[in-house]
Amino acid sequence: MDHPRQNVTEYLWTAPRVGESRRRTNLRRRVTFLRELEKTGSVSYSAARAGIDRRTLYRWRDADLRFRERWDRALQLREDELLDRGYSLARTGVPRYVFRNGVMTATYRRHDERLIMFMLNHTRARSSNRRVEVRGDDTF
């Protein structure tokens, strides 16, 4: 994406001050959440790793514009990485191995049309809020 990547440490110093006693704990948890969200793309998993209830995170997201921007950016970066990986797999195929009597005898690459259809469906739905119908009898 074209967003300049702002690391989580910068967010730590630009976050709003809430209260001295809880501020450090909340900031540490926010930073942990954002780091995990960048790695995994899962809000539930990242919330559990940071020790924050999801409702609290969504309340913080609604109240703090900077936190919302970092959250959205982390999800977008993870989505871009997944799409890049998906396009790479669709282009080059997935390696498959052939075994006979416990010995690998051959390898080949399998190209999965469903993968590219899913990615196109996701991309189109996200950009225009519509879904592409995929039927089992469609071929390239």
Image: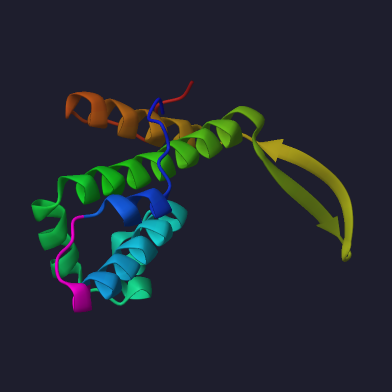
Residue 105 shows up from this direction = yes
Rendering quarter of residue 1? top left
Given residues 117 and 139, the one toward you in this image is 117
Question: Quadrant location of residue 125?
Answer: top left
Residue nearer the viewer, 76 or 4? 4
Nearest the viewer among 94 and 53 is 53
Q: Is residue 132 visible?
A: no
Compared with residue 98, is residue 122 higher up or lower down, i.e. above or below? above
Q: Position of residue 118 (x, y in %)?
A: 39, 36
Q: Residue at x 41, y 54 (%)?
A: 9
**On screen, 66 above or below 50?**
above
Is residue 12 rendered to the left or right of residue 18? right
Drawn side of residue 7 relative to residue 16, left or right: right
What residue is rendered at 42% in x and 58% in y?
Answer: 35
Give, as a single range, the part of the protein colored magenta. 16-22
Let me know if residue 50 is in the magenta part.
no
Position of residue 129 measured from the top left corner of the image (x, y, whole percent): 17, 29
| Residue at the front extreme, as displayed | 20
Q: Residue at x 22, y 31 (%)?
A: 131
Residue drawn at x 37%, y 30% is 3
Does residue 86 sit above or below 22 in this rendering?
above
Residue 69 lies left or right of residue 96; in this view the side is: left
Residue 11 pos. (x, y %): 33, 51
Q: Is residue 14 left or right of residue 136?
A: left
Q: State the image quarter where residue 136 is shown.
A: top left
| Colour scheme | rainbow
